[in-house]
Amino acid sequence: MGEVENRTCTECGSIPVLSDEFTAEPQASAEAPPVAQMESVEGTKRAARKRKKSHLIVKLLVAWFGLIGLIVLAGRSKNREVVTNVSRSSNPETAYRLDETEIDFVNKVMPLANVNLSGFIAATAPEQRNQFVRDPIATAKKMAAFYSLNPVPRIDPATLKNSGSAVLDLPKGKALETTWTSTDGYEVDAVFTEDSNEWRLDWDHFVRFSDYPWPLFLAGSGPVVGEFRLLARERLAEERKAAEDISLVFYAPRFGNPGETGPQSPEFLVKRDSEDGRLLDAAFALEKAGKRPFGVKLENEDPADFIRVRVRVRRSESEDGRKYELEKVIACHWYSDDSPGVSTAVQPADK
């Protein structure tokens, strides 16, 4: 006890104070590795980070190519559905399926038909449209007259989606019948026939060609005789089924809206036992049975109880007013084919 200088060790007699000569050597921390070891650990960490980064890139690439593969497969599956499911019916039991021969035909023709339809719709001048249609020389004159009297609906080809395809057996050979919908609300059907080794659009069928607009013809304008593509409905079919005349009303179709009709005509009376009467009876019977001319298997989008006809009609003026006469039923369809499309042969009674 006492001041520092008075304190001495009881054994050696020295003052217990550290001198300048004595300094403790710092001991290396057990947690601090040598510099070489630290560099080795840091290098290992960097390598691990590089490996993780490389693995991440590989995983991203695998995921990306996998996604691309799924998109391609989905697209192929969708295209396959287009050519195999030809009916827009919501009931899968009644949807018609193409057989293998029909699938091969559709797969061959559909790409060519798609190019021609897109080119036709995108064209802005008659001479441009003309290169995509069948029988272009004969069609050119009709096309010029038609578009001078009828508005041209503007459809963006990019908005069109194929909703059905079927093989059509026409008397002159096979054709491809297709249906399309657009995001603009249009529904159209288009037929393609082989012409000069190309599959071109049946323009007359596509635009529902008539010599003159039906509403203007009914109003007394234009030629007194004309050929028209119209929708026909039988009036009082059940009530008049025993009558000797068929009572008809003709309607103008509406392009892009198959479920709607345009202006209607006054009543037409056609003798049942005449050639025209037998054709009309056969066409209405076919419609009631849920069938269509030439056995086309696409679902019918026209209004119920209506049939498609190509007819020649005469208009006359008299003191009693304006009158209309059905001169001839050319066909019970709108294709560019003069075959009637229905059979008037008497079917044998079921036993």
Image (tube, rainbow, N blue to C red):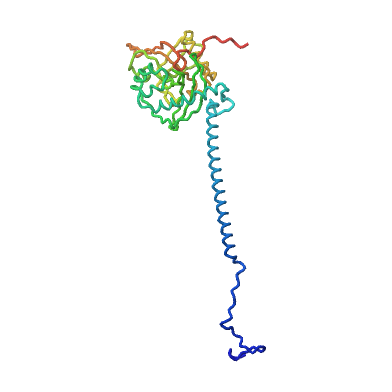
The relative height of residue 194 versus residue 347 in the rendered view (above or below) is below
In the image, residue 146 lies at what x, y percent?
36, 20
In the image, residue 197 lies at what x, y percent?
46, 19
Quarter-of-image position of residue 17:
bottom right
Asked if one can make out residue 42 in the rendered structure from this viewpoint, the answer is yes
Asked if one can make out residue 232 in the rendered structure from this viewpoint, the answer is no
Say which of 247 and 29 sits in front: 29
Q: Quadrant of the N terminus?
A: bottom right
In the image, residue 195 lies at what x, y percent?
44, 18
Count of numbered circles on the image: 0
Give left or right: position of 141 versus 289. left
Give left or right: position of 2 versus 257. right
Say which of 221 and 54 sits in front: 54
Say which of 114 and 52 sits in front: 52
Q: Quadrant of the C terminus?
A: top right
In the image, residue 198 lies at what x, y percent?
45, 20
The relative height of residue 56 versus residue 343 in the rendered view (above or below) is below
